[in-house]
Amino acid sequence: MDAANVRSARIAGGSLTAGDTMEDYLQGNHDYWQQGYEAENVESFVFRPYGRILKAELGLDGSRHERLLDFGCGSGASLQFFKRKGFDVYGVDIAVPDIERCQRRMPDCADHFAVIDPKPSAGTVFFGGNFDIIMGIQAFYYFPTDDFQALMQSIYNQLRPGGIIWATMIGTKCWYYENSVDAGNGLREVRFQRPRVSVDRYFIQFTSSEEDLLAKFHLFEKVHVGYYDACYHEDEGSDFHYFFIGRKPLK
Ligand SMILES: C[S@@+](CC[C@H](N)C(=O)[O-])C[C@H]1O[C@@H](n2cnc3c(N)ncnc32)[C@H](O)[C@@H]1O
């Protein structure tokens, strides 16, 4: 792994060291996510596309120990699912408690997980790159337009030719959108207070349509586009997310 991209030493305590400065959006999102992401089990919007598309259609079933990177892996539920299938799994995230949870969950490959710099850079390479699949499930949208483009370039560079990107992107139909204001450069700041959850200084790039989705992932050939949605509480609303599977061209 490119040591310059890994900040586990610098932010091991969950806060930045004195002298560090971060753009406001990065600092806000970084602070928000240090609470960790409690997700014990693999989500249906992960295991269903695995069965229906990766395995059934693309022949990516883990039997060849395919290299899989989960960007914004949270506490590792998806990675544990894919590891059990035989994939060679790697995960990166900005949240210290989540990476530690991944390491406790999968101690035999604890060095496959790293806390990373919140700001993406086009030249970043994690764990030597050359991945068969890079997934970003509810994790690629915490960036303004220019940082998102840098992230996509780095994802592209780290996929082998023909490799698969798998992304889910929050839509403007999600209830967070109506609780957000323009923060410039493609970002919106989400703020709301509810009995269950309060959100403050939390920055998201929303996706408005399938065309917008395809434009965001223009470096990749489209394989499939879809969405998933749910609503659990009338005071909250839709959880709408777009779904994208693309391929790095073989050239
Ligand atoms: C909604 S959670 C999803 C976690 C996981 N992908 C899942 O589906 O269970 C979003 C994740 O993105 C991570 N994240 C937020 N900003 C990030 C950044 N700048 N770089 C890397 N990860 C980030 C958070 O720490 C969090 O774990």
Image (spheres, rainbow, N blue to C red):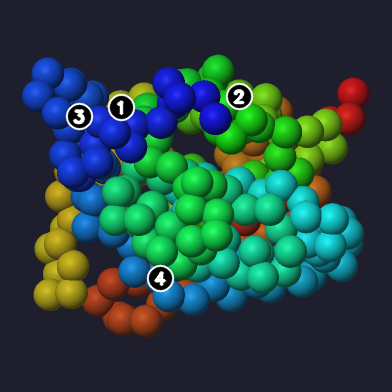
- CB of mark 4 within 8 Å of CB of mark 2? no
* Disc 1 C-beta below 8 A from ligand 1: no
Cα distance, mark 3 to mark 2?
Answer: 23 Å
Of callouts 3 and 1, which one flags the residue occurring earlier in the amino acid sequence? Answer: 3
Judging by the rendered image, the residue that carries numbered circle 2 is: 153
Number of numbered discs on residues: 4
Q: Crowding near pointer 4: few (<14 within 10 Å), some, many (20+)?
A: few
Instruction: Give the residue drawn at x 23%, y 51%.
Output: 34
The answer to which image quadrant residue 38 occupies is: bottom left
Observer-side mark, 3 or 1, equals 3
Residue 89 is left or right of residue 99, and the answer is right
The amino acid at mark 2 is Gln
Of callouts 4 and 1, which one flags the residue occurring earlier in the amino acid sequence? Answer: 4
Observer-side mark, 4 or 1, equals 4
Q: Position of residue 50 (x, y in %)?
A: 72, 66
The amino acid at mark 1 is Gly
Q: Crowding near pointer 1: few (<14 within 10 Å), some, many (20+)?
A: few
Q: Quadrant of the C terminus?
A: top right
Say if residue 112 shows up in the picture: yes
Judging by the rendered image, the residue that carries numbered circle 3 is: 24
Judging by the rendered image, the residue that carries numbered circle 4 is: 39
Observer-side mark, 1 or 2, equals 2
Q: Quadrant of the N terminus?
A: top right
Q: Is residue 5 above or below residue 62?
A: above
Judging by the rendered image, the residue that carries numbered circle 1 is: 184
- CB of mark 4 within 8 Å of CB of mark 1? no
Q: Is residue 129 above or below residue 240?
A: above
The amino acid at mark 4 is Ala
Cα distance, mark 3 to mark 4?
Answer: 27 Å
- CB of mark 3 within 8 Å of CB of mark 1? no
Instruction: Give the residue drawn at x 17%, y 21%.
Output: 20
* Disc 4 C-beta below 8 A from ligand 1: yes
